[in-house]
Image: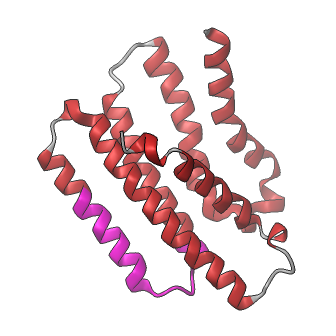
Amino acid sequence: MIYILSFAMLYGLLPFLYFLFVKKRILNKIQAVLPFLILVFVSAIYEFVFTVLLRWDSSNWFMSYCIISFFTIYYFYSKVLIKIKQTIKITSLALFISLLLFLIFEFQKNDFLIICSFIDAYITVFVFVFSILWFKMVFQELEFESLWDSPFFYIISGLILYYFGNFFLFMM
């Protein structure tokens, strides 16, 4: 069991540590995803120290992580999709805040898994829509010869695989 926990913690720490060592070379390309890397870094430390070692209640952390992860993904897409209309970005943010307020007032703290599943389902739809907008923008501008040359392609592909791979899990 300790090996699994150690692996999970290292898995969360490595992307941010890698960024710290090579930040001068990739800062301009990867700056949009930096808040998400910091969130994964902090969450790996928090989960290991406070949830595993100190055995604190994890419900507050789960809800906080769901909310903060949306804002980090929103920040990423707002930096990557600079040429997209602001109304689309503001509308998606207003919908999220409306959903969040509804969930906070409708459910109790003990229902944190239900709240997180609704938030993650919204994030999945958000990633789907904004990924389509990114692909549309890339194919209209034809800035890259191949998608492999775009650093954001890998990040967006990872978000798509993660959120769509777990979509039905989020809906449970």
Residue drawn at point x = 79 percent, y = 72 percent: 147
Image quadrant where residue 109 sits: top left
Q: Quick check: 31 left or right of 50?
A: right
Residue toward you, 25 or 15? 15
Image quadrant where residue 122 sits: bottom left
Residue 127 position within the rendered picture, expressed as x and y whole percent measured from the top left: 51, 63
Start and end of the magenta stretch?
78-99
Residue 41 position within the rendered picture, expressed as x and y whole percent measured from the top left: 59, 38
Residue extending farthest right? 145
Residue 135 position (above or below residue 3): below
Residue 51 position (above or below residue 95): above
Residue 103 position (above or below residue 54): below
Residue extending farthest bottom? 140
Queried whether the magenta region covers residue 93, the answer comes back as: yes
Residue 132 position within the rendered picture, expressed as x and y whole percent measured from the top left: 57, 74
Residue toward you, 78 or 134? 134
Residue drawn at point x = 57 percent, y = 41 percent: 40
Residue toward you, 80 or 134? 134
